[in-house]
Amino acid sequence: MKNVKQSIFKEAVNQIISNKMLRGMAAKQLDKYLYNSLKELGRQQLEQEKLDKYYFMSSIVEQVRKNLDKGFIKPKVMKKMAQVFVGDSFTADRYKKINPVREAYYEKYGDYPPQFLVLSPGKGCNLHCTGCYASADSAIAEKLDFETSRRIIREAHDIFGSRFITISGGEPFLYKSDGKHLVDLFEEFNDMFFLVYTNGTLITEGLANKLAELGNVTPAISVEGWEEQTDQRRGKGVYQRILKAMSNLRNAGVPFGISLTATSQNAEILLDDHFYDYFFNQLGVTYMWQFQLMPIGRGKDVMDLMVTPEQRVKLYDQWAHLLEDKHLPIADFWNSSSLSSGCIAYGRWNGYFYIDWNGNIMPCVFVPYYVDNVKDIFANGKTLGDAIQSKMFKNGRKWQKDYGFENPDHRGNILMPCSIRDHYKNFKYNILTPDAKGEDEEAEAVLHDPEYEKLMIEFDNKLQKLTEGIFYEKYLKKEPVTHEA
Ligand code: SF4
């Protein structure tokens, strides 16, 4: 029965991609399949979580179908994407089917491996965005050598069984080491899919065509809002260069997304549906990842840039509206944790961790603290599997489990999933270990700043008050009981 269902599923995906005539009908069939599969996920998922996941998957299918119809995505590129995302990650089997690689990992480490990692191979960037840490001079910027980058991806593939890698930066398309570029890695690991966070300005016609030929890469281009906000932070003329990059990608048929960091200053734009209508319907964006500024810095300016607890709740309501009513595939790292059953950091099963240009191994791009370095790990004959066994990583995974990851009888507030932002006190005193170092001076400095700690805890307490009612009513379907953040 299971095999019959899977072949119906694969056939529907195939028809959507390859058969324009039957696309609409196949999309309806796939939608039904997704709904039934997600409803079958079992008690470890709350009913509303299953529904949110269904809305998200269904929205992806709808957006892909629209962009295939418009000719913005080429079927060949889409086939690869479907193999990685739809075929492996989001079927009902996700919670049962464990492959031999994952079993071997379990035998060795007592838990299943993460699903992916984020790699920032180089800090160099060709832009000079306000407040950005990246280095403008790519020739001298810190970076991993090509062999180290390659080994990281090879081990993710072989030891975790991962088929998905996220690349960040710096500007990834500027990365060059030993005469090699990232495209060489995309080419070599052609059974893996790469999501690349980029400023978009280096996506020429030639690069877009190359990405189409490879068929295993999707760029997520950073915007700050409209032209005014994007140019204000990224530099004059950058928005127009982004539009050109998007046009190149549409012409080549490569699906692309946008990524955006919400701040107290652009939150209003994100509460307006016009923004999404324009990017999704007119520019052919297929998905959007939204982040919220994580204040790592002691200045009041940095703290003031973070969205307020009230704005965060409004952004949650907006996300739910965009997903349920407008069917737009958008995930907000902090407000959409129902899609991932909570925090996915610390190399959690089905989650991820982060390696930067110095090789420092961090739980998450928003948790800038490390114990191990991948260059030392490799030099000592160890592997990526060993790299995520530090006490700090284990503390983080224990917290995720205690917070109720996949435990329907004891779930923490799903609207406050973040181990560092939403539970700062717990992070500082129960997860962080004395051997952990800050990724940079600012990350180190805030650990010794009582004012920073006070402001973070105040934010958490306020957020708890504002979100607890929503969590209880919408997700637990019962009356709220007040706890400490
Ligand atoms: S630490 Fe926060 S930002 Fe990072 S994965 Fe967990 S919830 Fe998301």
Image (cartoon, rainbow, N blue to C red):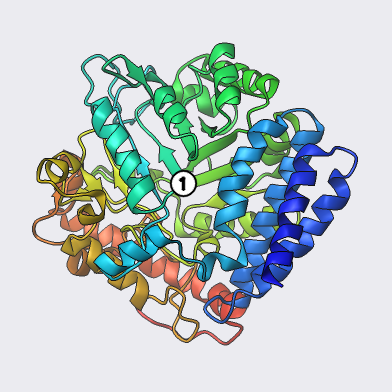
- At 62% from the left and 52% from the top, the residue drawn is 86
Splitting the image into 4 quarters, where does residue 18 fall?
top right
Question: Residue 38: x and y, percent?
Answer: 65, 68
Q: Which residue occupies the foreground of this view, 125 or 277?
A: 125
Q: Is residue 36 above or below residue 281?
A: below
- The picture quadrant for ligand 1 comes to bottom left
- At 43% from the left and 34% from the top, the residue drawn is 189
Q: Is residue 313 left or right of residue 431?
A: right
Crowding around mark 1 (Cα neighbors within 10 Å: few <14, some 14 to 19, many 20+) is: many
Question: Residue 48: x and y, percent?
Answer: 63, 73
Splitting the image into 4 quarters, where does residue 40 fall?
bottom right
Q: Is residue 168 above or below residue 245?
A: below
- At 86% from the left and 37% from the top, the residue drawn is 20
- At 64% from the left and 32% from the top, the residue drawn is 77
How many numbered marks have been drawn onto this rendered protein structure? 1
**Quarter of the image that includes the C terminus:** bottom left
Per the image, label 1 sits on a secondary structure element best described as loop
Residue 345 seen in the figure? yes
Question: Residue 381: x and y, percent?
Answer: 13, 46
Q: Is residue 173 above or below residue 62?
A: above
Kindly identify which residue carries mark 1. 163
Q: Is residue 437 left or right of residue 107?
A: left
Under mark 1, the amino acid is: Arg
